[in-house]
Amino acid sequence: MLGRFKDISLSNWILIGMILGLLTGIILNFYMPDSFFKNIILVDNVFYLGGSLFIKMMKMLVVPLVFCSIVVGAASISDIRKIGSIGGRTIGIYLITTALAVTLALAIGILIKPGSGLDMVAAAQSSNVTINQTMTDTILNMVPDNPLNSLANGDMIPVIIFGLLIGVILAKLKEETQLVSDFFSQGNKIMMEMTSIVMKFAPIGVFCLMARTFAGLGFEGILPLGKYVISVLIALAIQAFVVYPTLLVLFTRLNPIKFFKRFFSVMFFAFSSSTSNATIPLNLDKLSEMGVSMDVASFTIPLGATINMDGTAIMQGVAVMFAAQAYGMDLGASALLTVIFTAVMASIGTAGVPSVGLVTLTMVFNSVGLPVQAIGMIFGIDHILDMFRTAVNVTGDAICTLIVSFKNKSLDIDVYNGKKEMDPANNFLLDDLDII
């Protein structure tokens, strides 16, 4: 019996914690609306302590995790200058698609209003503040006066800028600064392991957050969660089946229907596995069947699995609007631009550990002053959405690879269109890349 519990994955435990917390909160709201036991002992002590401790552990991770990831990521990405136009085009397209993804998510969030009806204003100390700096202030605030103060205060955009600069310089100096590079690389591994440890407490934290929230809201809080899920799924569908095909047609004039017919199996594998890294060999194999040169794909696909997180950016954009609406906070134009920039940078600095997108979501929330407690409400259903996000992520990697391969004249269009067989010399065997 105990072995069966051990076989349950962390994601499923988080989902169980969400469901139990939701049911517990609704039962307390319905049967003990004004009970001393509910209000004082459970809601204001047990649930508050459990939820707050988990949120504080999440916040503890954000600055060192993102800073080390950004430094290591920027240092490795800078090496692609040796590849010339392939590297420039690849990163350019990845950044553009991620910016489009988060912009689309914000637009969907504004249109559907997933957080409306979820009255959390009383829990927000600054809910009556409109976050709308001037564009000049937004740009100036990106550059830290004192990087150490920015790290200590959790000012994420200055931290990101500083981390990017360090990463680029480390890549430029190479062997001269190998010791410092190793320090950040090992620090990144430490923070990823720490994230994995903290995530083991997620089911308890989610249970307490959900129970405390719904003990006050009751059934009224369920509809906004459903609207949040629908908003994310709509944005993901538009990104996958409208934005990506449009980019493919604009840059290559290739037929996107032929792409999806042949690529569906890869999307399904990504959906079922919820991991971009494990999908890399299958993605490469399918692209080689479409006539893409492995000289391009073997670079763009692993890089995309690291920095191209359009699905995660969509989740973060919708989550921002969900939280802002739930807490009655008015995000101005400059705040929305800050969200776009931070989400794009977060996608580059996202570490390869489960649910780390929700950790970097804390960074996005902090960048515009949103209460991070709202993350607890969407934590439990994230695994379901993560499956769809991963499918979108790997699709974006493949579309970008096709565009870059076409622009660099390394795509066999006749093979893509099915007019001839793939050249055996371009065949990619799954055993050729030990990446899983």
Image (cartoon, rainbow, N blue to C red):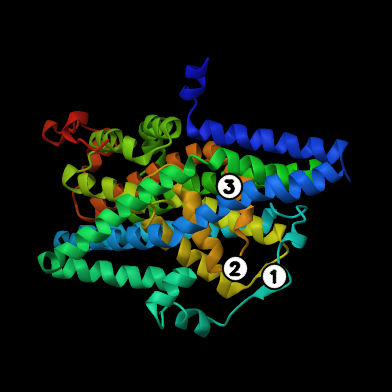
269 or 205: nearer the viewer: 205
Callout 2 environment at 10 Å: few (<14), some (14 to 19), or many (20+)? some
Q: At label 3, which amino acid type do we have?
A: Val
Where is mark 3, residue-wise? Answer: 232
Looking at marks 3 and 2 on the same chain, the residue that comes earlier in the sequence is marked by 3
Which-is-in-front pick, marks 1 and 3? 1
- The percent position of residue 35, horizontal first and vertical second, equals 87, 43
| Mark carried by residue 369 | 2
Tell me residue 303's x, y (percent): 28, 50
Nearer to me, 215 or 131: 215
Q: Position of residue 13 (x, y in %)?
A: 55, 32
Alpha-carbon span between mark 1 and mark 3: 26 Å
- The answer to which quarter of the image holds residue 372 is bottom right
Left or right: where 399 falls relative to 101:
left
Residue 294 place in picture, x, y as percent: 18, 42
Q: Helix, strand or loop at disc 1?
A: loop
Q: Amino acid at mark 1?
A: Ser
**Disc 3 to disc 2, how far (Cα)?**
22 Å
Say which residue appears at 42% left-offset and 59% top-offset.
346
Give amino acid for label 2: Gly
Residue 345 in sight: yes
Where 386 sits versus 361, above or below?
above
Looking at the image, is mark 3 or mark 2 nearer the viewer? 2
* Residue annotated with mark 1: 126
- The residue lying at 71 percent from left, 67 percent from top is 125
